[in-house]
Amino acid sequence: MNGEIVKYGINNNLQGYLSLPSADNGPGLIILQEWWGLVDHIKHVADRYAKKGFVVLAPDLYDGQTTVEPNEAQKLMMELKISDSSTKIISGINFLKDKNYISNNKIGCIGYCMGGGLALYMATQKVIDAAVPYYGVLINAEPDWSQINCPILGHYAEHDKATESLDQIKSELNKYNAKHTFHIYDGTEHAFFNDERPEIYNKQAAELSFERTIKFLNENLK
């Protein structure tokens, strides 16, 4: 792997996976985990974006816990408090800025599943400049959509309950004239971007969504 686990926050009580581009600085990017925790897949995703010139931090929202069991993952996700997660994410953003890793003071946020919902939530917190939710599921919170302050690019699967919430999300974003684009990928299922789950990974959709995301981030962060 390209990166390493770093400590940050008050008394270094938080941790995350930091992956730097070859230049050691660039636009910032926060990667938010699926319900499994900060697993190797998320670290590899962080490395992919670092290779594209972004300074990437994946905060550990479960404080070291990971799982491969869906029931345990659901329990961990449901126990997650949105206020605690937001604090960890904002602390991560401040860490990147305090260390002068960010070349232009701009930071985006990409999240997957649970993390996708958090990416949508963070778009209302006035701390990021672009949000990319992948099949985002809003858990334990209803964002104040009137506070949206950045463009959103969403990637969703055709065969996924998470996609059923899109009409409501779009309605709220339209109400406040928020800039947004959502793509629904034909023939895909939830978590189609996760190449460590061959039963649902969709290479074509994953690569297309990655290309679209790079273009979106370049337009809004560079």
Image: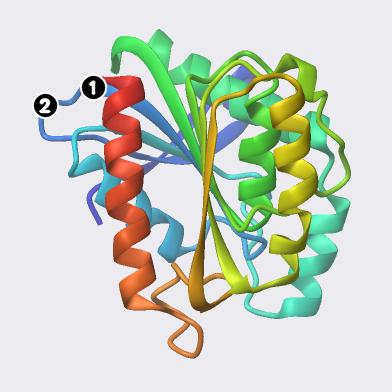
The residue that appears at 66% across and 37% down in the rendered structure is 120
The residue that appears at 49% across and 90% down in the rendered structure is 199
Determine the CA span between mark 2 and mark 1.
Answer: 7 Å
Residue 14 is drawn in which quadrant?
top right
Question: Is residue 47 shown to the viewer in this render?
Answer: no
> In the picture shown, does residue 169 fall above or below 106?
below
The residue that appears at 78% across and 73% down in the rendered structure is 72
The quarter of the picture where the N terminus appears is bottom left
Left or right for 145, reference 185: right
User: What amino acid is labelled 1 in the image?
Assistant: Gly
Label 2 packing within 10 angstroms: few (<14), some (14-19), many (20+): few
- Along the line of sight, the residue nearer the viewer: 126 or 31: 126
User: What amino acid is labelled 2 in the image?
Assistant: Ala
> In the picture shown, does residue 173 fall above or below 36?
above
Where residue 150 appears, as percent x and y from the top left, is 54, 20
Where residue 82 appears, as percent x and y from the top left, is 80, 36
- The residue that label 2 is drawn on is 23
Question: Is residue 67 shown to the viewer in this render?
Answer: yes
- Along the line of sight, the residue nearer the viewer: 87 or 200: 200
**Residue 26 bears which disc, if any?**
1
